[in-house]
Image (cartoon, rainbow, N blue to C red):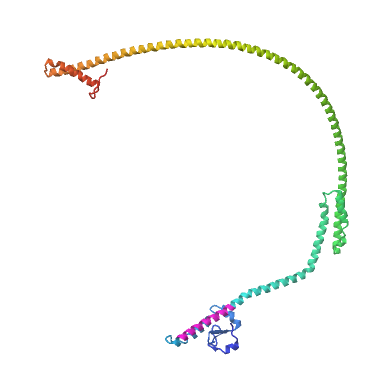
């Protein structure tokens, strides 16, 4: 809050002036340390770098002037009151700054509102100032648009028939050129109308001639088509009559050929029946002959098989007898050979033993014992009872 000058005179002035803020007075009103600041300078003091520093210094100086005794009840009450006053001073000064900020926040809105009033009113003024020129330009544009429409009319209807072009010509004649709002447009409007009418009338003449030629061409084409159709119909009737005659002749020929065919088929069937009967008889006789030959062949084959069996059995028995005799001869030869070899081995062993005992000066009575020993050794070798020794036959 800002304090008026009348209210300032009733307050206790702490300092008549703050050196760095000559327009600010620090005042003790009993509840807080207030500040009387010239309203013109209020925002500058808050906005300046350290602008509030002199005021804070003055408040600190005042708060530090007294030193209450914390040991007494009054001293503690004075300290509590002094701290509360400093807090109130803070709230008061902060409120001043808050009011300034709120006012500054409203300032852009007021400026924007004035800018909008400025734009709206000057836009209206510019529009009112230019209105006569705008109206004139609109008349010019309207005239140009109407003239362009008239000039474009022939191009729009160039594909239409003569009847439609006649209707457009009548409509264009009916347009009053005096409807133009200014005489300066009248010559141009009349010229545009005349140019469009000239082109449309030329188009009408061309279309009328083309349509007449097209009608004549269509008539000639229709006559030619009718003649061609009549010729085709006559040709079709003649062709149908000729086709009917040929069909009748063909039917008669088909009937004749069918009768001949039936007769030939009957003859063929009779001949076929006769041939089939002869073939059946031939097959019967042939079948009986084949059956008799087959029976004879079977008997001959069976007899031959029996003779072949007898001969095979004879040869088998003969082979077995021959093989048995050969085996017996081989066994006997092997046995004789083995006896001969074994005897030779035993004789050699006996001779060796006799020589051994002869050298040992044994009596002749021991010779039989030597033979028995030699045979025993030979048998042991044959049975494989003498290691690393074998008899080769």
Residue 187 in view, yes or no: yes
Question: Which quadrant, please, contains the C terminus?
Answer: top left
The image shows residue 69 at horizontal and vertical percentages of 43, 87
State the predominant SS element of the stretch in magenta: helix
Q: Where in the figure is residue 268, as x and y percent of width and height?
A: 71, 15
Residue farthest to the bottom, as pictured: 10
**Of 278 and 14, which appears nearest the observer?**
278
Residue 280 percent coordinates (x, y): 63, 13
Q: Is residue 187 left or right of residue 46?
A: right
Quadrant location of the N terminus in the rendered image: bottom right
Name the residue located 86 percent from the left edge and 60 percent from the top edge: 187
Q: Quadrant of residue 287?
A: top right
**Could you say where residue 172 lies in the image, as x and y percent from the top left?**
86, 56
Task: Residue 22: tell me if it is visible.
Answer: no
Q: What stretch is highlighted in magenta?
A: 76-99
Q: Against 178, is 369 above or below?
A: above
Residue closer to the observer: 364 or 206: 364
Residue at 85% across, 34% down: 229
């Amino acid at each position: 809050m800002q304090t008026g000058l009348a209210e300032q005179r009733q307050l206790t002035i702490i300092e008549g002036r703050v050196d760095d803020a000559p327009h600010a007075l620090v005042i003790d009103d009993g509840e807080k340390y207030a500040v009387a600041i010239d309203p013109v300078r209020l925002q500058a003091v808050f906005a300046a770098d350290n602008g509030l520093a002199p005021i804070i210094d003055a408040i600190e100086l005042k708060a530090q002037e007294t030193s209450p005794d914390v040991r007494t009840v009054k001293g503690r009450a004075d300290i509590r009151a002094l701290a509360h006053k400093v807090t109130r001073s803070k709230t008061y000064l902060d409120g001043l700054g808050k009011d300034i900020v709120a006012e500054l926040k409203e300032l852009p809105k007021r400026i924007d509102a004035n800018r909008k009033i400025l734009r709206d009113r000057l836009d209206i003024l510019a529009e009112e100032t230019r209105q006569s020129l705008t109206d004139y330009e609109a008349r010019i544009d309207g005239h140009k648009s109407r003239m362009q429409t008239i000039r474009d009319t022939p191009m729009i209807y160039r594909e239409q028939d003569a009847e439609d072009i006649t209707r457009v010509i009548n409509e264009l004649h009916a347009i009053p050129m005096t409807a133009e709002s200014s005489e300066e447009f009248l010559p141009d409007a009349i010229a545009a109308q005349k140019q469009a009418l000239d082109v449309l009338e030329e188009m009408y003449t061309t279309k009328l001639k083309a349509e007449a030629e097209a009608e004549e061409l269509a008539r000639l084409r229709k006559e030619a088509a009718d003649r061609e159709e009549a010729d085709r119909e006559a040709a079709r009737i003649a062709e149908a009559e000729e086709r009917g005659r040929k069909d009748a002749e063909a039917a008669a020929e088909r009937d004749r050929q069918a009768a001949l065919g039936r007769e030939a088929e009957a003859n063929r069937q009779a001949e076929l029946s006769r041939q089939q009967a002869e073939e059946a008889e031939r097959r019967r006789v042939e079948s009986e002959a084949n059956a008799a030959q087959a029976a004879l062949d079977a008997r001959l084959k069976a007899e031959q098989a029996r003779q072949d069996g007898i001969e095979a059995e004879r040869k088998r028995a003969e082979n077995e007898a021959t093989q048995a005799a050969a085996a017996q001869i081989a066994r006997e030869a092997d046995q004789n050979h083995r006896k001969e070899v074994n005897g030779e081995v035993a004789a050699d062993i006996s001779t060796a033993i006799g020589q051994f005992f002869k050298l040992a000066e044994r009596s002749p009575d021991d010779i039989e014992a030597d033979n028995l020993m030699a045979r025993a050794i030979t048998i042991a070798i044959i049975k494989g009872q003498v290691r690393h020794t074998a008899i080769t036959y």
